[in-house]
Every structure is written in structure tokens, then in C-alpha cells.
Image (spheres, rainbow, N blue to C red):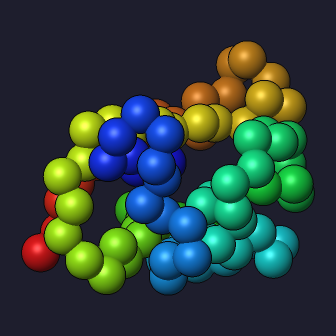
Amino acid sequence: MLFTNATESVVSNKQATQSSTYNELNASLAIDGSLNLTCCASCMSTTAELMPWWQVDLANFYHVVAVELFTRTDLDCQQDHSCGLSVRQLR
């Protein structure tokens, strides 16, 4: 989630896209506001690919004070699905 202050998320009702979609786990699931972090509830997923990506278009300029990223809670601890994760501002 992206916040402009302590409580206001700016990703609600925005357009999210990703490089591919695995098993109908589309990009919009990542910003649906739910904190149910088990597979197929509110998590997006790409297919296995070399450089997968996910993005959200905020449709405006914001002074972002915090970015919160969550990974699934139902994964085996040996798996790291956030490996190589980065946050970038695209213009």
C-alpha cells in the first residue's frame, strides 16, 4: 500500500498491471485493501519468468510517506518470493 499520510492509501481504485498472470491471480488483487495474505485470496502472481514486474498507475502526483509490501503467509519458509524486490518511481 502507498500512503500520503498515516491512514490514507492512494492505491484504492487505481489501475494495476503485471507482466503476466498465473492462475487468475491478477494485478488488482494486490491493491484490493485486504490483508488476507494466503494464496488466491488477495495476492497477485505472475508466471515463472526471468524478470517479472507489477505496477500501479496512481494517475496523479502524490507525496508518498510510506510504502508497505506484504508477501504471502502460506509459503514454506525456505521459499523467498520477494527475492530481488525493488520499488521504483516511474515517470
Look at 36% across and 77% down and name the residue there. Answer: 57
Quarter of the rendering containing residue 35: top right
State how many labels appear.
0
Residue at x 25% of width, y 48% of height: 64
Q: Position of residue 67 (x, y in %)?
A: 37, 40
Across and down, in percent, residue 2 comes to 40, 49
Q: Is residue 19 left or right of residue 5?
A: right
Horizontally, residue 78 falls left or right of residue 24, namely left
Please report the residue visible at 18 percent of the width from the left and 52 percent of the height from the top.
Answer: 63
Whether residue 85 is situated above or below residue 57 in the rendered picture: above
Identify the residue at the far left of this view.
91
Residue drawn 68% across the image and 54% down it? 33
Quadrant in the picture for the C terminus: bottom left
Quarter of the figure with residue 78: top right
The answer to whether residue 67 shows anywhere in this view is yes
Q: Nearer the viewer, residue 36 or 52?
A: 36
Question: Is residue 47 at all visible to an observer of this figure?
Answer: no
- Position of residue 50 relative to residue 60, above or below, is above
Measuring from the top left, give residue 46's x and y in whole percent: 62, 66
Q: Does residue 28 lie above or below 85 as drawn?
A: below
Percent across and percent down for residue 1 are: 49, 48
